[in-house]
Amino acid sequence: MKPATVAVTAGRPPHEVDQPLSEPITMASTYVAGGEREYGRYANPTWAAFEEALGALEGGRALAFSSGMAAVTTVLDLVGHDGLVVAPAHSYTGTLLQLGDLESRGRVRTRLVDITDTEAVVAACEDAALVWFESPTNPALEVADIPRIAAAAHEAGAYVVVDNTFATPLLQQPLDLGADIVVHSVTKFLAGHSDVLMGAVVTNDDQLHGVLKGRRDLLGSTPGTLEAWLALRGLRTLHLRVERSQANAQELVRRLSTHPAIGEVRYPGFGGIVSVVLAQGAMAADLLVHKTSIWVHATSLGGVESTFERRRRWKAEPATIPDGLVRLSVGVEDVDDLWDDLRDALSSLVG
Ligand SMILES: Cc1ncc(COP(=O)(O)O)c(C=O)c1O
């Protein structure tokens, strides 16, 4: 089946008389003993339906987590004491903060790399225990050569992990490119409506799946049932939202690239996230985000509504991200309305 059909059909109850078409929200902290579920921290039918659908889209077995960071943290915990983690210098700030915290406590060592410099990353993998990819990176939008680096990482015996939040399984399937584990902030495109915090991991290695599920059970980093239900509902239209948001993004990239207020447009060629660097720097960027009526000044991304923010307003954002960089999360509105709103705000900056 094609991804659009999988997004709509996977994780449904059986087509039997009187079955609901959608998995209901099962509110349960415990189950009648003797079956496979037993307790609400170990299993829930609503999570299971979400996991089935996401697993089918990524080509593996999924596990739902309470947030993207819960998934990130659980996966990083696979690294043994003092093991080396290789990761992009421009990873999501939460991931960088988590790595920094683990390193400062002597738990792991980290080596931050320019993920676009394939040969340097391959060399950096030599003694790695885990190689972390974010591709495209947030918010620099750099793209990694996943198959080439994954092969080098495996030669070193390292786990290969890809944070696939930006691309979604519709535009990139990391397990097919050599990854052992895919990580998602479900909060973003997968759920897609800026109303859910959730995360997920996906793997096609049964042993790894068992280890990660065991960790989730003990950490208790499980999602709320309503969240899993909302995320699954969001997933049903993932293909439509990604298609529209990508088409809008591509058109906006074309129009933005000739606007005099814009110094640089960064776009990897796919997906719904665009980063622009304001020609007049950080102050212009801060003005811009308060001058629009459709675009909302907000962090996070991947919702149906268009949002933007200057990323360096966050202290943890690496200093190598330009001060005047604004990350645009392009929604599914009409592209002309999005452009008019943005163009008017940009034009007011250059007079
Ligand atoms: C690429 C990426 N990975 C992970 C996360 C963390 O996800 P969450 O906010 O759901 O914990 C984010 C959040 O912005 C992200 O952008």
Image (cartoon, rainbow, N blue to C red):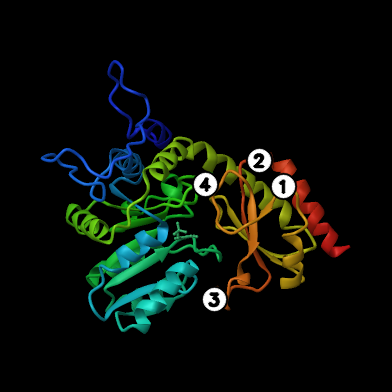
Residue under label 2, please give it: 333
Residue under label 3, please give it: 318
Q: Residues within 10 Å of mark 1 (few under 14, many from 20)?
A: some
Image position of 20 with respect to 348: above or below: above
- Residue 277 visible in image: yes
Rendered image: mark on residue 294: 1
For this rendering, which residue is in front, 217 or 251?
Answer: 217
Q: Amino acid at mark 4?
A: Asp
Real-space Cα separation, disc 4 to disc 1, in angstroms: 18 Å
Q: Is ligand 1 less than 8 Å from the beta carbon at label 2?
A: no
Residue under label 4, please give it: 195
- Residue 165: where, in percent of width, then height? 45, 55
Q: Which residue is at a point 42% across and 52% down the rendered structure image?
A: 198
Q: Which residue is at a point 37% across and 47% down the rendered structure image?
A: 224
Image position of 181 with respect to 234: above or below: below
Q: Which residue is at a point 65% across and 40% down the rendered structure image?
A: 333
Q: Are marks 4 and 2 in contact (CB under 8 Å)?
A: no
